[in-house]
Image: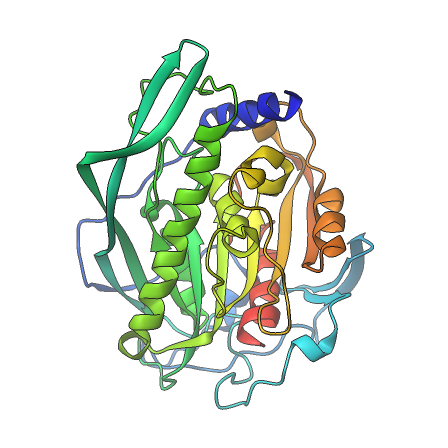
Amino acid sequence: MQKVKRSQIILLLFLITAGITVAIVANRNDTKTVAVPPHADTDQQSSNSPGSPQASPEPGSTGDETVSFSYDTTYSSSISSSGVPSLQTNVPSSKLPAVPEDKNPIGRYGSTVFNDVGSTKDITFKTRPAMKLVENSPSDYDLIDDPSSDVNLKLNMYYPQGDPLTERPLLIFVYGGGWWVGDRYQREIDAEYFASLGYVTMTIDYTMFPGTDVLNPLPTIDNSPYSKIVYESASDIFSAYQYALANKSTYGIDTSRIGVGGWSAGGMISQALVNLQALPRPYGVKAVLGLSNILPADLSDVFELTGGFKTYGSDFNPISMFASYDEDVGFAGTPNDHAADCAYLDSIGHNCITVTYSGSGHELDFSIDPALSTSVPFFKQYVAGY
């Protein structure tokens, strides 16, 4: 019973703390100049013509001031004055085969090399039944498919303009909001920024609870509504992944180098994508970074009701990272225990590292510090560098 209560608290606080400004952009299939988020590498942008790639100095090069710090036994970092640390973990180097320089040029993926980012928006990648809540009693609801109503889930694609490479790693960004609020535009700032580093990026919609006028947290006896929403929304990420595979030539995607980043509820379902046994294996996904989230398995009944954990092997072995503030105000005072999350994943043969930022808060962006200083090297090493 304690686990059920905790899951309900988590969903309630996701809503309370989801002070989300959704920037709805009306223009479609557009190209625009990116307003790059605060980052010390921005002064290294070339004055060459927009869209042409230029190599930037690698972090830690001559003139950078370097300090060392560590978060826990599985993560350490050396951070330069450019704000981009390198990661050292307990993951064997054999899991990171060398990428030819023609696919991973020096200076790319660690700093801004493109001034212009193009986009193709409002792409329907999946049509599925809407969700419907069924009240069994005032203290127990079920969540079921509503065959009388369909929902079109959409995604946006972002890509560097003037890029000579035809195979680029892909990052999929997943918004948060407790399955009650938010959409793909919430993570546009992250998608645009990482596209300016040389990635192809994607933001997606996923299955949500119906309406905003129902009780939150949702009364439930067996937690099945949360099990279903985790499974359905994680399966939507898998469908977006399949869209990327089917359209790799159109967007110039290297489908063997894909990463996923999710915030809050988006982080939970991003972790579910690679951990949930009930979902097919997304073989191209090499790394998942969850900001301000907990491992969905911590809600043990969610995973029990959806088939348990995947078995990792030589052909599917992505790495997970958890990153959050010391005091995450999105969990009603319940502390994040990412060390326990990682210890559990490691115990079943998965790979996991964790970062904790000093301070209190819940909202984090992949393209703004403090998360910027870990997301850039994490994706560079474990996705672009795979």
The residue lying toward the viewer, choosing from 44 and 23, is: 23
Q: Quadrant of the N terminus?
A: top right
The residue lying toward the viewer, choosing from 20 and 138, is: 138
Is residue 87 something that shows in the picture? yes
Instruction: Tell me where residue 20 appears, x and y as whole percent.
Output: 40, 35
The residue lying toward the viewer, choosing from 186 and 228, is: 228
Instruction: Tell me where residue 256 appears, x and y as whole percent.
Output: 48, 76
Q: Would residue 128 be found to the left or right of residue 238 on screen? A: left
* Residue with the most extreme right position: 73
Instruction: Tell me where residue 204 appears, x and y as whole percent.
Output: 34, 52
| 260 over 118 or under it: above or below | above
Residue at 80% from the left image edge and 55% from the top image edge: 70
| 98 over 136 or under it: above or below | below
Q: Would residue 130 be found to the left or right of residue 259 on screen? A: left
- The quadrant where residue 145 appears: top left
Q: Quadrant of the C terminus?
A: bottom right
Q: Please state the total of marks drawn on the protein image.
A: 0
Q: Would residue 250 be found to the left or right of residue 363 on screen? A: left
Residue at 71% from the left image edge and 60% from the top image edge: 349
| 125 over 254 or under it: above or below | above
The residue lying toward the viewer, choosing from 222 and 186, is: 222
Is residue 293 something that shows in the picture? no
Residue at 48% from the left image edge and 39% from the top image edge: 265
* Residue with the most extreme top position: 138
